[in-house]
Image: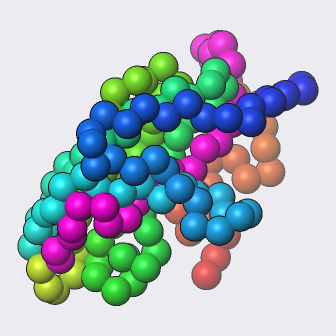
Amino acid sequence: MAFELAVDQLEVKLLHPDARPPLRGREGDAGYDLSCVESFVLRPGERRMVPTGVAIALPPGVAGLVTPRSGLAHRYGISCVNSPGLIDPNYRGELRVILVNHGEETYRAHAGDRIAQLVLVPYWAPELRVVDELPESERGEHGFGSSGR
C-alpha cells in the first residue's frame, strides 16, 4: 500500500493577543514548541489545563501529538497527563495542554513560556473488519515481559 502525503505548510490561527505560533527551536527539530498565554502555578501532584492561544488546521491524514518537553520533565518533573495528547485533523479549537507536576517543588510558569511540544505524524485509518480468528504469528498472545529481561 502506498501512502503519500505532501504538505509544506500548516495553517495557524492566533486566538489571543499574547499567543505565539508553534516554533521549532532548530532547523531539523521534529517538535514545535507550544507556549502558554498566561502565567500559572503547578504544585506537586497538581494538574492543570493550560491554554496556548493557538488553533491549527491539520491536513487530512495528519494527526498532532502533544508531548512533554524533556527539559521541564528532567528539571521540574513537569509532564503531560495524557501523553501524547492527540489532536485530530478535524479539530479547530484552541490547543490546550494538560500538565502535571510529578516533582517535589512548586513550578511557576510565565506567559510565553514553552510548556510542551507538538509533533505532526501521518496516520492510517483503515476500514475495520470483525473476524472470528486472527492470523497466527510467532509471538501469538504472549506479552507483558514475555521476551525476557
Q: In which quarter of the image is residue 67?
A: bottom left
Relative placement, left or right, of 71 versus 2 is: left
Relative placement, left or right, of 67 versus 47 is: right
Viewer-side residue, 143 vs 55: 55
Q: What stretch is highlighted in magenta?
A: 107-133
> Is residue 149 in view from this perspective?
yes
Which residue is at a point 40% across and 50% down the rendered structure image? 20
Q: In which quarter of the image is residue 104?
A: bottom left
Q: Where is residue 48 in the image (x, y as percent from the top left)?
A: 16, 55
Q: On the rendered image, what quadrant is the N terminus found in?
A: top right
Which residue is at a point 90% across and 26% down the rendered structure image? 2
Q: Position of residue 5 (x, y in %)?
A: 79, 29
> Is residue 115 in view from this perspective?
no
Residue most extreme to the front: 17
Q: Position of residue 33 (x, y in %)?
A: 48, 59
Which residue is at a point 40% across and 60% down the rendered structure image? 116
Relative placement, left or right, of 44 versus 80 is: left
Which residue is at a point 21% across and 70% down the rendered structure image? 109
With respect to residue 118, does 126 lie above or below?
above
Q: Where is residue 56 in the image (x, y as percent from the top left)?
A: 47, 32
Q: Would you say residue 116 sits in the magenta stretch?
A: yes
Viewer-side residue, 125 vs 17: 17
With respect to residue 18, does 55 lie above or below?
above
Residue most extreme to the right: 2
Coloring scheme used: rainbow
Q: On the rendered image, what quadrant is the C terminus found in?
A: bottom right
Viewer-side residue, 92 vs 66: 92
Q: Would you say residue 39 sits in the magenta stretch?
A: no
All told, the count of numbered labels is 0
With respect to residue 75, does 51 lie above or below?
above
